[in-house]
Image (cartoon, rainbow, N blue to C red):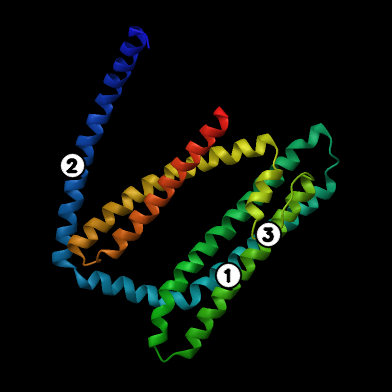
Amino acid sequence: MSNNRVEEIKKEDKKAFKSFAIMMVISAIVGAIIGSGSIYLQEHMGNNLSDFLLNALMMITPYASLVLSILVIVVSVVIYSNSRKKLKLWNQSDEQEEIIDNIEEKLSYVLLFASVNLIIGFFFFGAGMGLFSEDSYGKVILFFFGFIVCVVSTVLIQNKVVNLEKEINPFLNGSVYDFKFSQKWLDSCDEAIKLNVYKSSFKAHKSVTNTCLILWIVCVLGYSFFDFGIMPLVMVTIIWLVQTVSYCIESIKCSKNKIN
């Protein structure tokens, strides 16, 4: 490596370090404010805040999955129906290529809504375990019915969207009901779609890393001031480790394949 290149690297580090140092100072100040605020909340609200949040959660849990699922189903049906109508009118001319782009964008939002609803459904399923200690069998039945609707509707919506995508792009393969769907779908994608997947995956990796850092701070403060216990911190650390290690290992494998 030439001396000029070494100097360029040092200058780049020196320039970036100023912003880094300022950010560290700001983070320390914000951390001190959050820590002080947590102590204040713990002293003045303490268990009252936890009880209030828990009671509020127990009130909405029996109905949340069902209500959200019905809302997602209605929105998905409307978007899917409009997309299929537009597809029938598409004559595959270059002038109307934006019609397909618009259809695919809306279908992506449908998949987003369905996926978010499924994750929230699993959250409320876990939160609803406390309902079994109650005598209200009606709430328990409604709770289970809502979760079933959430899971089934998500799978059916994803299947409809994927099949419509395969009609638009005949080279795509894979069935939602296949346990190896993700790999088969990715293998059938062209280079443009794969590039989009890779960019999205890297963005997701960065987002999860930042989220884990924020959750780590929350868990540390909760452990110290609100008796969260050690388990939330352990779970966040496991997620952080899994996504970091898997990303690095996959990167190493790709580098080896490139060399070979």
86 shown above or below 230: above
Q: Which residue is mark 2?
A: 29
Query: Does 57 sit above or below residue 188?
Result: below
Query: Which numbered dot is residue 150?
Result: 1
Q: In the image, what residue type sits under mark 2? A: Ile
Q: Quadrant of residue 16?
A: top left
Mark 1: few/some/many CA within 10 Å (<14, 14-19, 20+): many
Q: Which mark is residue 9?
A: none
> In the image, is residue 5 above or below residue 191?
above
Q: Amino acid at mark 3?
A: Val
Label total for image:
3
Give the spatial CA distance, label 1 vs label 3. Answer: 16 Å
Find residue 242 and report its horizontal and vertical position in percent: 42, 51
Q: Secondary structure at mark 2?
A: helix
Tell which residue pokes out farthest to the front in this image.
Answer: 260
Q: Amino acid at mark 1?
A: Cys
Mark in the foreground, 2 or 3: 3
Q: Are marks 1 and 2 in contact (CB under 8 Å)?
A: no
- In which quadrant of the rendered image does the C terminus lie? top right
Asked where in the image residue 194 lies, by quadrant, the reply is top right
